[in-house]
Image (cartoon, grey):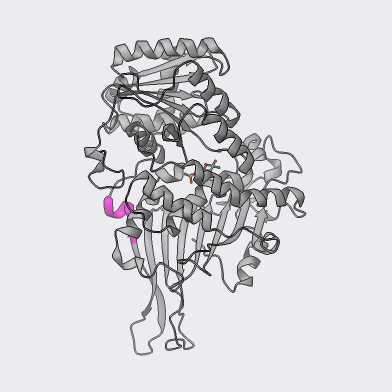
């Protein structure tokens, strides 16, 4: 049996099969910025199988060499390790190919089948395939159906396997995600389906499991008896860039909250799994989502805030309002900020609010999970010159990855005021190297056939069950005050009011 990705010795003991990765949407932005640099870095770290090929599938005509040159430029620009190493690139270059076709043309898939057969003979890739769908979601059903129709995807057997990676978004709401799931499961099994949520590929997110379940001291305090509340923040200073058309369809709730933030919440709140298998971990994550209390009408009005950025300043530079961005409707009601309060109706978390805040155009990029503990009982140190804060465990997902603990400490001297201090662990300083990009890890896990770090169908379904009523409420009740926060601020006043009603504040991470 293969060892698990979270087990220390796992990397070296897991066997890796030869394979070909076919990327649909090979001329797109994700391939250029993330996928190709990730595959190159896997090659650089000798993590790819010795018998390996990568084929870009897209609609624009171009030769293998043109594609290779374009990819070389993209990898040079976007690789986390620069400059690219010529000897590694030239070896990698030999394994890179291009296949032009429309997504809906039978002959393109027939030709692809023949071409992959030729590559198997040349590269020794033994018929093992990964199809990476880095395309607009509307093409997912079509491509999967065509791959199946032309015998390109098949169930795992003793000779070879085929797997499909699907980029998010997986549906636009509960119904569309169920329709998509019902359609694709006619052609591929759950075991073959790898739904990407790239947050699961982040080292710091994986470390959450290790932190919680490999340290005995936290388990006994990780519950409603000791924790006052939890804050999860995914803040970005960037706006929507050139993704206006995409964002007008999606909005922030679908783009970040329904997937990335719920993954963070599930891992923070889950029970210890019975083992580290994909099933063991994902079963526990689903239970968390199932325990989330559905939002009531009162919650929609008082515990849920949406916002949209107006113009403002980020690091001293003036930036435009969302409604002025390219391909955005001048009176758009799409949200770029979401804050909400959730409760988990289960034994561990009863009565503990989870506050979630995700947004574009806040003052800085930071993803953080903060566990705020209950106040120390009694008034022993609450005299006038002391600042007696609650203990906070802040898990910094990015950037400056690390974990810090805030505690109260006596200031030296006879007057004994108490002051909060921080105990800090930083990945960079301690391990002295940059963590791999999420996509490196996820592509590698798919090659290894381990789906632990991918979202399972029932996780996606549960998450949509929570958020679809919000989307419906919002579409019936358009916002009246957009834009309601200037770029470069921490969001609309209503988000502060939400906290103030509970006598709490948002942390400034
Ligand atoms: C993507 C969203 O899934 O995640 C983007 O579509 C967002 O809008 C990005 O910017 C954030 O990812 P990261 O890894 O930079 O936190």
Which contiguous range is marked in magenta?
425-431
426 in the magenta segment: yes
Residue 5 on the magenta span: no
Residue 10 visible (yes or no): yes
**In the visual, does 91 lie left or right of 185?**
left
**Quadrant of image for the N terminus:** top left
Across and down, in percent, residue 121 comes to 30, 11
Using the image, determine if residue 272 lies above or below residue 70.
Answer: below
x 59%, y 74%: residue: 503
Residue 247 lies in quadrant? top right
Q: Residue at x 48, y 56 (%)?
A: 288
193 sits left or right of 48 in the view: right
Q: Residue at x 46, y 42 (%)?
A: 455
Residue 43: image quadrant is top left
From where the camera sits, is residue 311 visible? no
Q: Provide residue 9's location: percent of width, then percent of height.
A: 22, 44
Q: Is 29 in front, or is 501?
A: 501
Which residue is nearer to you in this view: 470 or 23? 470
From the viewer's perspective, tell me whether residue 10 is left or right of residue 262.
left
Q: Most prominent secondary structure in the magenta stretch?
A: helix
Residue 117 vertical position relative to residue 327 in the rendered view, above or below: above
Q: Position of residue 65 (x, y in %)?
A: 41, 13
- Where residue 299 appears, as percent x and y from the top left, is 66, 62
């Amino acid at each position: 049996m293969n060892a698990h990705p979270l087990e220390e010795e796992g990397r070296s003991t897991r066997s890796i099969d030869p394979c070909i990765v076919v990327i649909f949407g090979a001329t797109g932005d994700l391939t250029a910025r993330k996928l190709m640099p990730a595959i190159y870095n896997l090659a650089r770290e000798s993590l790819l199988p010795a018998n390996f090929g990568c084929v870009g599938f897209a609609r624009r005509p171009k030769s293998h060499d043109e594609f290779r040159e374009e990819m070389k430029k993209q990898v040079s620009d976007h690789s986390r390790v620069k400059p690219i190493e010529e000897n590694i690139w030239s070896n990698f270059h030999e394994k890179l190919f291009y296949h032009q076709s429309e997504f809906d043309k039978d002959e393109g898939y027939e030709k692809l089948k023949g071409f992959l057969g030729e590559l198997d003979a040349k590269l020794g890739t033994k018929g093992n395939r990964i199809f990476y769908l880095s395309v607009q979601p509307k093409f997912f059903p079509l491509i999967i159906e065509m791959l199946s129709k032309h015998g390109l995807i098949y169930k795992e057997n003793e000779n070879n396997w085929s797997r499909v990676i699907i980029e998010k978004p997986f549906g636009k709401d509960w119904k569309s995600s169920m329709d998509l799931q019902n359609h694709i499961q006619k052609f591929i099994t759950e075991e073959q389906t790898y739904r990407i949520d790239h947050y699961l590929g982040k080292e710091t997110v994986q470390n959450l499991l290790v932190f919680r379940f490999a340290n005995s001291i936290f388990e006994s305090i990780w519950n409603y008896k000791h924790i006052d509340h939890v804050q999860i923040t995914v803040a970005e200073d960037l706006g929507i860039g050139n993704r206006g058309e995409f964002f007008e369809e999606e909005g922030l709730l679908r783009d970040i909250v329904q997937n990335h933030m719920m993954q963070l919440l599930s891992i923070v709140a889950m029970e210890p799994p019975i083992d580290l298998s994909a099933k063991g971990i994902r079963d526990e994550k689903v239970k968390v989502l199932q325990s989330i209390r559905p939002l009531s009408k009162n919650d929609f009005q008082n515990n849920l805030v949406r916002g949209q950025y107006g113009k403002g300043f980020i690091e001293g530079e003036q930036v435009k309002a969302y409604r002025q961005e390219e391909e955005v409707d001048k009176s758009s009601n799409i949200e770029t900020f979401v804050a909400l309060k959730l409760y988990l109706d289960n034994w561990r978390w009863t009565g503990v609010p989870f506050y979630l805040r995700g947004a574009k155009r806040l003052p800085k990029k930071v993803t953080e999970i903060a566990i705020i503990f209950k106040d120390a009982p009694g008034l022993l140190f609450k005299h006038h010159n002391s600042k007696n804060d609650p203990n906070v465990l802040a898990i910094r997902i990015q950037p400056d990855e690390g974990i810090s603990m805030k505690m109260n400490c006596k200031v030296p001297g006879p007057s004994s005021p108490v002051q909060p201090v921080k105990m800090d662990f930083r990945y960079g300083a301690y391990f002295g190297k940059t963590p791999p990009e999420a996509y490196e890890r996820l592509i590698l896990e798919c090659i290894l056939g381990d789906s632990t770090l991918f979202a399972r169908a029932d996780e996606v379904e549960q998450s949509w069950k929570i958020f679809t009523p919000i989307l419906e409420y919002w579409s019936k009740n358009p916002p009246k005050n957009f834009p309601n926060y200037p770029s470069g601020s921490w969001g609309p006043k209503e988000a502060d009011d939400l906290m103030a009603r509970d006598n709490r504040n948002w942390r400034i991470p």
